[in-house]
Amino acid sequence: MINSIIKTIKDNRLIEIADKVLNGERITTDDGIYLFKHAEVGYLGTLANYIREHRHGNKTFFNKNFHIEPTNICVFDCKFCAYSRFLREKDNYDAWELTEEQIYDSIKAYEGKDITEVHIVGGVHPKMGLEYFKNLIENIKAIRPDIHVKAFTAVELDYMCKKAKVSYQEGLQILKDAGQGSLPGGGAEIFDETIRAQICKDKCTSEEWLAIHEAAHSIGMPSNATIIYGHIEKPEHIIDHMNRLRELQDKTGGFNAYIPLKFRNGNNQMSDIKEVSIVDDLKMYAISRIFLDNFSHIKAYWPMIGRQTTQLLLSFGVDDIDGTVDDTTKIYTMAGAEEQKPVMTTEQMINLIKDVGRQPIERDSVYNELRDYTVSQLV
Ligand code: V47
Ligand code: SF4
């Protein structure tokens, strides 16, 4: 069927790109830019869905997770961030800094529940360093040995390693020995140096972000990768970003998932920039699936993109929708995302996936399949 659809295309370059995809060949950076500029959404969806189904069939992965955000106090000043607060501000009425006890209580609250992952990220607090987080992870694992700890963006890791005067590899090894299992993909933003300088000039560089993920992969810690799209970047910058990730993935194979994060414009210093349309979202995810031929999973983070768009994206290259989350993150609610209370029960997660004809698979943090909900009943 796909071949007959392609025969209707008039643009020879788009036919060539489609042929590459159908033959399992890698597309070039110029092809990627061409797709952004000339391909319509139906064409992109057809190719991205072909790749998605070729790799995963109808399988759609999710996990049972929750987040801990130890603090929103941050030494950096990213223009898109609605969430962080400076330590020095006197009127910091909505800044928070959880105590260790509060963090351990939030882990204990899940006792007896079959949650498999805790995702820990936050602002870069000058007083929370490598030693603090090493102890924190050890104590979390003592309370809940079976839980996978996915923690710290490269931005947090860069700051804590530099402050502790250890190499990235040494710092990561300390955290791994304490029980950390993997790294989330945040902090990548956009790698192009000119755009990065305009939206988040004072935190770790693109090179440092990539070096941290490379160091993690070298010691057997997998990670994810993100991008923030839909602000002042151009297609060339998005493709450059994905190309740097594709090159690193060729080298290490350590990335699990790529997560395009839509720029949300609420309550930040870039609120004058209009958010992109849903058609642009669909194109972004589809081109990600087509370009990143060495990434197994393309993830839609539903608290950021919303439930209905998540359902649509399952036909535009996405095979993973993150987790149940349990209303434990504020990053996107504070930036104005539709999901003001991001919580989904397992049943809602399953129905969201089944309602668009896909197969709900509960996974663990490294994509072992735990349960197929098309054959297994919810208990
Ligand atoms: O690091 C912050 C981004 C990230 C905005 O790896 C924004 O499994 C858009 O990385 N508009 C945190 N983006 C979220 C994140 C994540 C989420 C779920 C799963 C995983 C994973 C990673 O969100 C931040 C920053 O890059 N961000 N503010 C904003 N206004
Ligand atoms: Fe800090 Fe992260 Fe917000 Fe940047 S995005 S200001 S590093 S919390």
Image (spheres, rainbow, N blue to C red):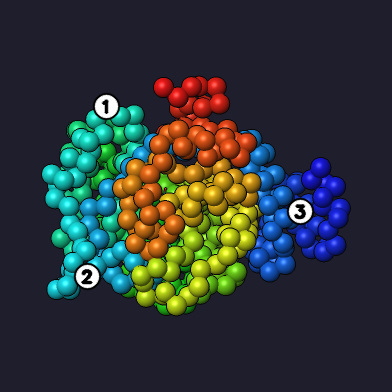
Q: Is 199 displayed left or right of 276 in the figure?
A: left
Q: Residue at x 56, y 26 (%)?
A: 374
Q: Is 373 displayed left or right of 48 in the figure?
A: left
**Tag shown at residue 324:** none
Considering the numbered disc 3 on the image, is that residue within a helix, a strand or a loop?
helix
Q: Earlier in the sequence, mark 3 or mark 1?
A: 3
Considering the numbered disc 2 on the image, is that residue within a helix, a strand or a loop?
loop
Mark 1 vs mark 2, foreground winner is 1
Ligand 1 appears in which quadrant? bottom left
User: x%, y% of residue 98?
Assistant: 17, 52
Q: In which image quadrant can residue 264 be found?
A: bottom left
Return the residue nearer the eye: 110 or 199: 110
**Tag shown at residue 18:** 3
Total numbered circles: 3
Q: Is 292 displayed left or right of 225 in the figure?
A: right
User: x%, y% of residue 344?
Assistant: 41, 41
**Tag shown at residue 112:** 1
Amino acid type, label 1:
Gly
Mark 2 vs mark 3, foreground winner is 2
